[in-house]
Image (cartoon, coloured by chain):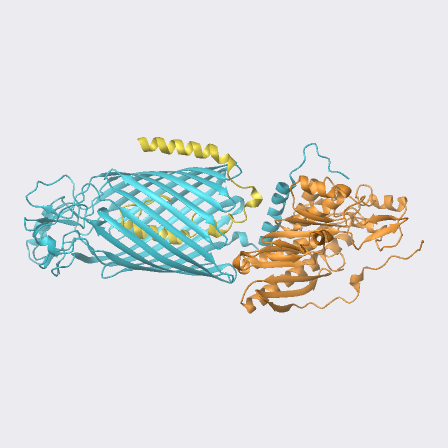
Chain colours: A orange, B yellow, C cyan
């Protein structure tokens, strides 16, 4: 059945939740939750000091909102949007943004160009709404000229995109926020914390009785082994996957993971891949990179001796 | 002199055996903690060194032993 | 798509260095100019022995880390010392009178008590500076200096150290050297070795000239040269070990100008008090080993030091600390230290008047046979914004022992080796 349907707006524009932090008691401490970067964000803190937990929750939420306001593509007033709107002219950046670009450059080099934050423009051709609206080759090729981190010029003080290019921190933003939150909280107090921003997770600190954090992952592979939990003591995990974003045409599932060199989806990536690494931003990069290997995702991670779980 | 020969042998053995011991840079999470520094409280160490320098016959070992004061 | 890998890149290693700058660097960007500020440690300590010496010490230390891992450390120390300390004479069942080392006045000790001289009242100021920086790849160099001044004592020293990292920074080998020059100018001048302490009335007109007969000069100096070899090795993720060997040689005036040794008759009764005399050279060797082990519930710090010198003093020091962190960021650290030393070859608690004088003799129990132990507890807590407050309380017990010298006569009726108890209380604030 073929059906033409127009592009769907991202559902984020509906009912943006208010910015407030909730504090809930639990057995070993408190859970602070708030909404940011289109996800439910939680910070679990093991302490008896409720005032400290609330203070740490506020710090975490403010940092997540700060990063969202600065780097979200969907926020008209963000630095990211400004850089994209002013593509073709030099835009001033600060130390933090420069360090992110340095990291992005290293990811681009390490992945041999597969991990590329300028690939966002390709979404103008691809709308992964589960329909069969697969674009034409011409439409994709037209956009390919606007993709490529090697076209970007940047320094400690500025960035210059070619006209028509766009950058998107979506592949790193939440993971970066998780790592920044852990860093800020560890400067406040030496208490065990678990930060979970929509499935991008990091933990630090020694819990009472040396117990690790129990994390439930909806992985069928775990159901098979009847162990629905991953235990995490220190470090981070991040998940990349296309479970909800794909196109289905003629029985062929087009994943939303695009090969930036051809502009077309990667063949047969896993449905979802979860990677563990010391920092969340590292785990996020590795998960995305693994997905880009398509059918070889798991082998790629095993060869690099990286702890991971995948669903196909 | 015998004890110096032993020390020299131990040092050489230690240096050559050392290449199999150790951690990768990303395994330094615990070692990087302030509490894991060899002298994690330099102020306490300095105050104690001063007390023991003036009350006992031994000083130094961990670092230079000079007292710098007339208390012994 | 595949990674083009003629040689597969080690992503873990590359990622580690990639995030170093991002997550380390931006933290400093967020709190504007954090790397250019100073880190301070300030501490106040009070040391009190029962009935003897008390000391108060104040330290203000600042450390600034510049770009490229260059570190400047500055420290200012103030201390005051007062109270009474043993003058070296043996206790007697009858009262004893001594002249103060300055010659200004006498003091009397009751029978049965260890003779203590309470004229000590000294204030000292010390300034220390140290500069550390990387030099070439894997090398770190450090130089520093120290200046200390008190009423009758001045000390100036310089030190230098070079360290090289091996095996991915898992092994570090270092060589250091230090040179100190001390000068002593006690009030009343320096006593002639083995001259008898002049007991009389300081106010009498002939006292001063007779006192000067017992003096050999106004001031003296001492030089100390140290070399330290160190090896640090990371064993595993939880454990690091350090081994040091140090060599120290001091020459010059090593005698204590305030200490005497009792000359006793065949019944143990003190006839005279002779000023002590020590060799003008001392060479020490120390072997030190330390390990820090990160257990699940805390951090263990254990160390051992062995010292031997050419005065025939041998000592062993064991030190054990265990830091236990709590979930609220506070921590507690119990501490135990055990120490034992053998007497210097020329140590003797007294001299028999009939014996010929030895070349060197001292009755200072601090170079005699002694055991000591320390038990203590430290409690620390973070105070917002990375500051820390900590409290330390320690109990130090020192037990001088006989070096084998037999007591006789009235010496059997007194305590020749009186133990000393002290409390150390300290508050530290770091910001």
Say left or right for C358 vs C382: left
The quarter holding residue B26 reads top right
Say left or right for C110 vs A194: left
Res. C136 visible in picture: no
Q: Give the residue displayed 20% in from the left and 55% down from the top.
A: C418
Q: Position of residue C348 (x, y in %)?
A: 16, 45
Say left or right for A246 vs A156: right
In depth, the one of A135 and C257 nearer the eye is: A135
Q: Position of residue A130 (x, y in %)?
A: 85, 55
Say left or right for A28 vs C213: right
In depth, the one of C265 and B20 nearer the eye is: B20
The quarter holding residue C17 reads top right
Looking at the rendered image, the quarter that the N terminus of chain A falls into is: bottom right
Res. C39 visible in picture: yes
In depth, the one of A235 and C161 nearer the eye is: A235
Q: Position of residue A240 (x, y in %)?
A: 73, 51
Q: Position of residue C174 (x, y in %)?
A: 43, 38
Q: Can you say whether C277 is above or below C48 in the image?
A: above
Q: Give the residue displayed 28% in from the left and 47% down from the top.
A: C340
């Amino acid at each position: 059945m073929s059906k033409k349907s127009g592009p769907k707006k991202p559902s984020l524009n509906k009912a943006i939740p208010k910015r407030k932090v909730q504090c809930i008691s639990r057995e070993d401490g408190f859970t602070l939750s708030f909404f940011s970067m289109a996800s439910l964000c939680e910070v679990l803190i093991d302490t008896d000091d409720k005032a400290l937990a609330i203070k740490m929750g506020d710090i975490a939420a403010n940092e997540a909102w700060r990063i969202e306001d600065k780097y979200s593509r969907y926020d008209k007033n963000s630095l990211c949007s400004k850089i994209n709107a002013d593509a073709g002219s030099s835009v001033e950046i600060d130390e933090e943004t420069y360090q992110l670009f340095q990291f992005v450059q290293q990811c681009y080099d390490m992945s041999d160009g597969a991990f590329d934050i300028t690939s966002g423009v390709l979404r103008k051709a691809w709308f992964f709404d589960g329909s069969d609206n697969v674009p034409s080759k011409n439409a994709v090729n037209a956009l390919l000229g606007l993709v490529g981190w090697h076209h970007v010029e940047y320094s400690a003080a500025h960035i210059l995109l070619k006209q028509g290019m766009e950058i998107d921190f979506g592949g790193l933003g939440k993971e970066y926020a998780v790592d920044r939150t852990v860093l800020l909280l560890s400067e406040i107090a030496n208490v065990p914390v678990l930060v979970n921003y929509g499935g991008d997770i990091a933990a630090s600190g020694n819990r009472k009785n040396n117990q690790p954090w129990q994390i439930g992952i909806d992985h069928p592979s775990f159901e098979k082994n009847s162990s629905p939990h991953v235990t995490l003591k220190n470090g981070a995990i991040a998940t990349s996957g296309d479970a909800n974003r794909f196109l289905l045409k003629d029985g062929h599932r087009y994943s939303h993971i695009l090969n930036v060199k051809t502009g077309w989806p990667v063949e047969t990536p896993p449905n979802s891949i979860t990677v563990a690494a010391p920092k969340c931003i590292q785990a996020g990069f590795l998960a995305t990179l693994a997905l880009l290997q398509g059918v070889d995702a798991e082998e790629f991670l095993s060869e690099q001796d990286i702890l991971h779980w995948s669903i196909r | 002199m015998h004890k110096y020969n032993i020390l020299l042998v131990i040092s050489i053995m230690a240096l050559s055996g050392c290449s199999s011991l150790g951690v990768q840079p990303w395994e330094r999470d615990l070692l990087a903690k302030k509490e894991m520094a060899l002298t994690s409280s330099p102020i306490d160490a300095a105050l104690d060194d001063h007390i023991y320098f003036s009350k006992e016959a031994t000083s130094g070992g961990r670092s230079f032993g000079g007292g710098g004061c007339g208390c012994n | 798509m595949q990674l083009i890998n003629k040689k597969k890149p080690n992503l873990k290693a590359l990622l580690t260095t990639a995030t170093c700058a991002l997550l380390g660097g931006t933290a400093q960007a967020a709190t504007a100019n954090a790397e250019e500020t100073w880190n301070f440690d300030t501490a106040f300590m009070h040391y009190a022995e029962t009935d003897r010496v008390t000391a108060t010490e104040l330290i203000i230390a600042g450390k600034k880390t510049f770009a490229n891992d260059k570190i400047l450390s500055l420290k200012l120390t103030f201390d005051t010392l007062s109270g009474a300390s043993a003058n070296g004479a043996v206790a007697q069942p009858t009262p004893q009178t001594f002249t103060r080392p300055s010659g200004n006045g006498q003091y009397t000790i009751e029978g049965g008590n260890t003779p203590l001289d309470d004229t000590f009242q000294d204030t000292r100021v010390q300034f220390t500076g140290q500069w550390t920086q990387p030099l070439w790849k894997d090398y770190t160099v450090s130089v520093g200096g120290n200046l200390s001044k008190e009423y009758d004592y001045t000390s100036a020293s310089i030190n230098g150290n070079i360290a090289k990292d091996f095996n991915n920074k898992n092994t570090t080998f270092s060589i250091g050297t230090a040179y100190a020059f001390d000068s002593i100018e006690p009030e009343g001048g320096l006593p002639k070795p083995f001259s008898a302490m002049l007991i009389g009335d300081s106010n009498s007109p002939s006292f001063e000239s007779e006192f000067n007969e017992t003096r050999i000069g106004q001031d003296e100096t001492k030089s100390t040269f140290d070399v330290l070899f160190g090896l640090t090795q990371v064993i595993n993720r939880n454990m690091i070990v350090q081994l040091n060997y140090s060599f120290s040689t001091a020459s010059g005036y090593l005698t204590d100008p305030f200490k005497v040794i009792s000359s006793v008759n065949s019944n143990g009764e003190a006839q005279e008090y002779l000023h002590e005399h020590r060799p003008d050279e001392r060479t020490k060797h120390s072997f030190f080993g330390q390990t820090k082990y990160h257990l699940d519930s805390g951090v263990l710090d254990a160390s051992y030091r062995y010292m031997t010198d050419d005065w025939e003093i041998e000592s062993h020091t064991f030190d054990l600390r265990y830091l236990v962190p709590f979930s609220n960021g506070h921590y507690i650290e119990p501490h135990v230290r055990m120490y034992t030393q053998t007497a210097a070859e020329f140590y003797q608690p007294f001299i028999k008047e009939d014996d010929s004088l030895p070349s060197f003799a001292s009755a200072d129990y601090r170079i005699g046979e002694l055991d000591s132990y320390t038990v203590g507890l430290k409690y620390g807590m973070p105070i917002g914004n990375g500051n820390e407050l900590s409290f330390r309380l320690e109990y130090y017990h020192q037990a001088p022992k006989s070096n084998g010298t037999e007591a006789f006569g009235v010496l059997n009726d007194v305590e020749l080796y009186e133990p000393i108890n002290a409390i150390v209380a300290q508050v530290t604030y770091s910001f």
